[in-house]
Amino acid sequence: MSQTIALPGLHGQTANLESLPSTEAKNGFAQLLERVTRSARPVVITRNARPAAVMLSVEEYARLVQAAPDPLAPLQADFDRLVAGMRTLRAQASVDALFGATTEQLGAAAARAAGKGKH
């Protein structure tokens, strides 16, 4: 006997999905599989009247995976900004000055930097 169950949906909305006890899902698996693939609507499988799993079509799964944001996108954007900052003329001039510096200049710069850290 199928019922409707409310589960959290996308963007804070509630999804009202058809539900089925696990014993009915097991006994009528072929029909359940046909229904899920034909309707493209997920079915919640319950155990002891509580949601235990969701059965969905491959197409629906692919749609959900495609819609999910890339978790690394913000890190990639930060990295790209840092690299772009390193490619400026000022940054290149700093690199050129560093590699063109004498040992005395490097020592003086290190001493100045160490002195800034003291309070």
Image (cartoon, rainbow, N blue to C red):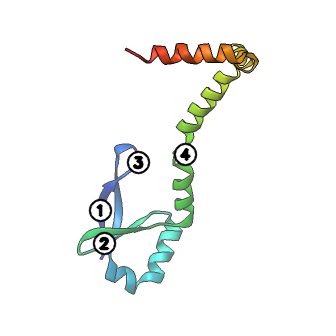
Q: Are marks 1 and 2 in contact (CB under 8 Å)?
A: yes
- Give the mark nearest the N terminus, 1 or 2: 1
Q: Nearer the viewer, residue 94 or 53?
A: 94
Which residue reaches farthest bottom? 27
> Which label's residue is closer to the chain start, 2 or 3?
3
Amino acid at dot 3:
Leu
Q: Are marks 4 and 3 in contact (CB under 8 Å)?
A: no
**Marking on residue 70:** 4
Which of label 4 and label 2 is nearer to you? 4
> Closer to us: mark 1 or mark 4?
4
Task: Judge whether residue 109 can be spotted in this image.
Answer: yes
Residue at x-position 48% and y-position 76%:
33
Callout 2: SS:
strand
Tell me the element at label 4. Answer: loop
Image mark for residue 46: 2
Question: Could you give the CA–CA distance between mark 2 and mark 3, rounded to whole angstroms?
Answer: 21 Å
Residue of label 1: 5
Tell me which numbered mark, 1 or 4, is placed earlier along the sequence. 1
Residue 29 lies in what quarter of the image?
bottom left
Mark pair 1, 2: CA separation: 10 Å
